[in-house]
Image (spheres, rainbow, N blue to C red):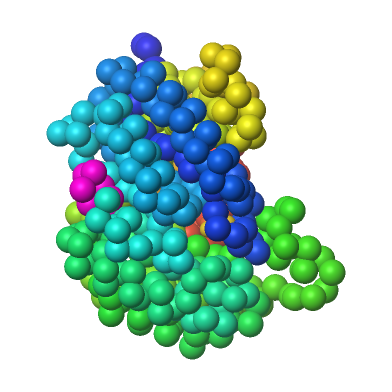
Amino acid sequence: MKFKKDLPPNALYVHIPFCARKCNYCDFNSVVSGTKTIDLYLSALESELSALKGQYVFKTVFIGGGTPSVLTETQLEKLLCAVIRCISVSEVQEYTVEANPGTLTANKIRLLKEYGVNRISLGVQSFQDRQLKFLGRIHSGDDARKNFILLRQAGFENINIDLMFGCPDQSLDDWENDLETAVELNPEHISAYALTYEEGTLLTKNLNNGVISKLDECIELDMYKTVIDYLTHNGYNHYEISNFAKPGCECSHNLVYWNNMGYVGAGAGAVSSIDGARTSNENDIIRYVNGIGEGKNIKSFGEHLPDDQFASETVIMSLRLRQGISNADFYKRFGYKIEDQFGDQINRLIGDGLICYDNERLKLTEKGLFIADTVMTEFV
Ligand code: SF4
């Protein structure tokens, strides 16, 4: 039987690799650049997007970064025009743009609305200025609150708020205050991630030099348990390890990744997964711009995943979802049962109480949820 990993991609990701300032913890593909570089980049991106026109039917679009909202109004309009030309607007169900509260303005919000964006992901991280300063964010807690209200006034009915926990001097009370403020604003979706120390960031340098020390692991775990309890008691469905949504407001675009379905990425460093082939665009902005300008291949990486590896990735990604992975769906897609490839691992993890079957879905138990990364390594 042919593997059905060749489902046509219906998600488009567009990368804007620019930020007003680099946050202390960030290792994403983003830089601080002048207007001229941004203009050149947008022209290259426009070309890449126009080549996609008519090739796919996108149901979700996600413009992320970096900070898409760092663009000037003119640049933002150019970007939104380029995207709209390569999609069929009536087919797109979810159109998200990431925004930083420090760079959003009433005019930019109006433009986003005008061009059909129907979901905003606001990088709040914290409402407390002390935490924001530690993280190197460019905005205040008040900026976040004000922008959220502006978005609502402009008619955005689907807003995500990103929050972060686990900062070195953050107390459980601080975290609870952030959660209370978030819930008072009543967004449709909340992403809550633990702070991680990535190679090459200022934060990791400070950690290695003894300037800061990590928060106690037990407190961090308490924070994670708190966010689950608090948000589920306030009407949010905990549908993915770090994501919570009001019923029906789960992020359709990210569900494509978690279900390991196909997607197309445009922009520097953007990854595409099409028909089992994973490719990545040139990461370096100048090489990306020049490559497009000279009509060269801008893919810097490509691999065709063997079928068993593709299945393994699918299990790992889908286990991130609290509903887990359906054995029937897996069978339909791959032509065999999950146990046929992972029988030993599944028996062992069930024995340890880390995963379980819920009807025919394989999912993490609560115990497994708290050490999800370790559980996932069993399926590599
Ligand atoms: S705004 Fe986001 S992408 Fe930009 S530096 Fe900060 S964390 Fe990284």
Tell me the quadrant of ligand 1: bottom right
Residue 189 appears in the rendering: no
Magenta residues span: 112-119
Q: Is residue 345 left or right of residue 52?
A: right
The answer to whether one can see residue 164 in this image is yes
Between 324 and 18, which is closer to the camera in this rendering?
18
> Who's the residue at 37% across and 39% down the image?
79
Image: 226 above or below 193: below
1 vs 338: above or below: above
Residue 88 location, quadrant: top left
Q: Is residue 104 magenta?
A: no
Task: Please tell me which residue is depicted at 38% across the width and 61% down the height of the picture.
Answer: 104
* Rendered position, 242 above or below 170: above
Residue nearest the observer in this picture, 127 or 191: 127
Residue farthest to the right? 209
Using the rendered view, name the quadrant where residue 314 is placed. Answer: top left
State which quadrant residue 92 falls in.
top left
Residue 63 coordinates in the image, percent (x, y): 39, 43
**296 displayed left or right of 251:** right
Name the residue at 52% across, 81% down: 129
Q: Residue furthest top?
A: 1
Indicate the position of residue 287 as horizontal and vertical percent values: 64, 28
Q: How many numbered marks, from 0 up?
A: 0
Asked whether, in this view, residue 37 is left or right of residue 65, the answer is right
Q: Position of residue 72 (x, y in %)?
A: 42, 51
Residue 290 at x, y = what percent? Answer: 60, 24
Residue sitting at 44 percent across and 62 percent down? 103
- Is 114 included in the stretch rendered in magenta? yes
